[in-house]
Image (tube, rainbow, N blue to C red):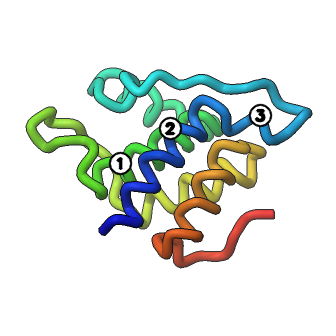
Amino acid sequence: MKHINFILLAITCTLVLGACTSKKEQPVEVSSAVFYNHDSLSYYAALAYKDEDPRGLFITGAAAYLKWQGDLPDSLGLTTVPLDEADIMLLHAAELGSQDAKNLIHCLHKNGCWHHSLPE
């Protein structure tokens, strides 16, 4: 279970510094508060489902992994997608060019939590 804690660290790093790995993209900052607010999660889920927005797909997928590892307590009543759907969202976000999604997928893979092909 210790390797799961690395996922939270990776998401935090990805949210703040993830896009810095590519010179073509500007750094993307996402407040951790986004993940702890029902309205924010609903907003990004709507972007993901309705507009196939890469950021919405990334945040919705990442939230599912945060909940899975216990970093989104049930007491908050936050709804996330199942992990298989989160995987699809993260892959689609990566296909659409989200460096954040790519970074998270690679982190999940390194920690044995990703069981799909890796995006290029």
Tell me the SS state at disc 3. Answer: helix
Which mark is on residue 12?
Answer: 2
Is tag 2's residue or tag 3's residue first in the polypeptide sequence? 2
Mark 2 closeness class: few <14, some 14–19, many ≥20 residues within 10 Å: some
* Of the pair 108 and 117, the residue shown nearer to us: 108
Mark 1 closeness class: few <14, some 14–19, many ≥20 residues within 10 Å: some
From the image, tell me which residue sits under label 1.
Answer: 66
Q: Quadrant of the N terminus?
A: bottom left
* Of the pair 84 and 5, the residue shown nearer to us: 5
From the image, tell me which residue sits under label 3.
Answer: 20
* Of the pair 18 and 5, the residue shown nearer to us: 5
User: What residue is at 64 percent from the left and 62 percent from the top?
Assistant: 106
User: What residue is at 31 percent from the left and 46 percent from the top?
Assistant: 80
Residue 17 x, y percent position in the rendering: 66, 33
Give residue 20's quadrant in the image. Answer: top right
What type is the residue that disc 2 sits on?
A: Thr
Mark 3 closeness class: few <14, some 14–19, many ≥20 residues within 10 Å: some
Which mark is on residue 27?
Answer: none
Is tag 3's residue or tag 1's residue first in the polypeptide sequence? 3
Q: CA distance from mark 2 to mark 1?
A: 11 Å
Is tag 2's residue or tag 1's residue first in the polypeptide sequence? 2
Q: Quadrant of the C terminus?
A: bottom right
